[in-house]
Structures are given as C-alpha cells and as structure tokens.
Amino acid sequence: MTIQVNTDKHIEGSIRLKNFITEELESSLERFSDKLTRIEVHLSDENGGKGGADDKRCLLEARIENMQPIAVTNFDSSIDQAISGAIDKLKSALDTVFGKMQNR
C-alpha cells in the first residue's frame, strides 16, 4: 500500500507530519492492506492564514484493487484531529464496502 501526502500552501508538509500520517494509516487500516493499492492524503487549510473553527480539512482517497476509489473528508480545528477523524470515516466506509462484498 502506497501512501501519498499532499498539502496546500498553508500547511507545511514536514517529515514529522508524513511519518505521523503513514503510521496512523498503516496501523488503522492494517486489516485492509492487502486490498488497498494506494491512499492519497490531501491536507488543506480552508481559511488560509486566517483563524477559524474547523477550518483544517483532510481528504483521504483509498484506491482499492479492481474497484472504484473511496473518498472521505473530515474538517476539524487541527490537522491531527482532521486526520484522525478522516481515518475513522475511511475505516467505516471500507467496512461497509467489504461487508457488502462478503454478503454477495
């Protein structure tokens, strides 16, 4: 599973941030790792340099073997919280997709 991290010009794409995201995704999505080919992470600050509540956005797009990609978005007040919320949403979406496949 390849993990690609993209940030906008208002968020610094540091090594620490990329390592944090990679570790969180690998540990949280371990049970799906054989079915996922790539995960794209898009981080942005919706208000730019201005402050504001829930203005950090994390969009996760999971590429699944032989299927359409799944995308989820989460907004929160910090990047770390936005990432964690998006990972929770992605886990739920993948549970739904693979659960439906098993029921067929």
Image (cartoon, rainbow, N blue to C red):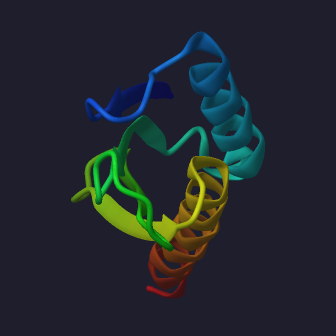
Q: Is residue 62 above or below residue 57?
A: above
Report the number of discs: 0
Q: Position of residue 16 (x, y in %)?
A: 67, 18
Of all residues, the one furthest to the right in this rendering is 27
Q: In this view, does 93 lie above or below 81?
A: below
Q: Can residue 94 be seen in this view?
A: yes
Q: In this view, does 29 lie above or below 90?
A: above
Q: Position of residue 63 (x, y in %)?
A: 33, 46
Q: Where is residue 64 in the image (x, y as percent from the top left)?
A: 36, 49
Q: Can residue 64 be seen in this view?
A: no
Which one is in front, 72 or 56?
Answer: 56
Q: Image point 66% across, 59% down: which residue?
A: 81
Q: Left or right of 30: which side holds 49?
A: left
Q: Image point 73% across, 50% down: which residue?
A: 28
Q: Image point 57% across, 38% down: which residue?
A: 34
Q: Which of the 4 quarters of the picture holds residue 97?
A: bottom left
Q: Position of residue 42 (x, y in %)?
A: 34, 43
- Quadrant the C terminus occupies: bottom left
Which one is in front, 24 or 48?
Answer: 48
Of all residues, the one furthest to the left in this rendering is 68
Of all residues, the one furthest to the front in this rendering is 50
Q: Is residue 19 above or below residue 36?
A: above
Q: Image point 49% across, 74% down: which residue?
A: 93
Which one is in front, 85 or 35?
Answer: 85
Of all residues, the one furthest to the top in this rendering is 15
Which one is in front, 55 or 88?
Answer: 55
